[in-house]
Amino acid sequence: MKTKSEFLSEEMVKLLNYRVEQEEYSARIYLSMANWLNDKGFAGAAKLFKDYSDEELVHADKAKNMLLANGIRPITPALKQPKQDFLSLPDVLISALDHEKEITKQCYALTKAAHTEENFMVVELGLWYCKEQAEELNKVQYFIGRLEAFGEESIMLRELDKEMGQLAK
């Protein structure tokens, strides 16, 4: 396996491997949230966050495939343990929004670096990640908006959980 690519600089390889790591870590974060939600009786939200976890692995594959297409073997990252406990469903949602904001910044940095290098293959991938992040931010912000509109009483949380479950695959 080659360690250098004609079309990917060392910086691009580093950024793509970082994207793999962060997307896989995102999957672990959402899996931890799903487990906590399930344990606390939020079956609908748990199912939706498990879907989110699975989606993050698909996102990691995009960066892996870019590396592999250029003859570079992706690094299989060591991942730190994500947070295991949350205060409430609203706490999970706020944590998810904060996480997605950080991932959005990372995707912007990848796209900017690719644009600076005039690496249009990676620019295209970076733009895909940025578009995906707009969707991710919107999904979580929608649920936070529901909490702001209807409150955090147990009956409202039950309704939100039910709605989240209906959106799951």
Image (tube, grey):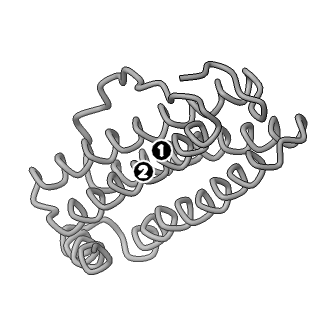
Q: Residue at x 72, y 56 (%)?
A: 127
What is the secondary structure assignment of the residue under circle 1?
Answer: helix
Give the vertical position of 141 relative to 27 (above or below): below
Q: Residue at x 14, y 65 (%)?
A: 43
What is the secondary structure assignment of the residue under circle 2?
Answer: helix
Give coordinates of residue 121: x percent, y percent.
76, 49
- Asked if residue 142 lies left or right of residue 91, the reply is right
Relative depth, front residue between 161 and 115: 115
Q: Residue at x 58, y 29 (%)?
A: 72
- Asked if residue 161 lies left or right of residue 124, the reply is left
The three-letter code of the residue at mark 1 reads: Ala
Give coordinates of residue 83: x percent, y percent.
30, 32
**Marks 1 and 2: CB-CB under 8 Å?**
yes
How many numbered circles are shown? 2
Give coordinates of residue 10: x percent, y percent.
73, 21
Give the vertical position of 18 relative to 46 (above or below): above
Give coordinates of residue 36: x percent, y percent.
18, 46
Label at residue 56: 2
The three-letter code of the residue at mark 2 reads: Glu
Q: Mark 1: few, some, or many residues within 10 Å (few <14, many ≥20)?
A: many
| Image-quadrant location for residue 5 | top right
Furthest residue toward front: 1
Q: Residue at x 59, y 46 (%)?
A: 101
Q: Which residue is mark 1?
A: 60
The quarter of the image holding the C terminus is bottom left
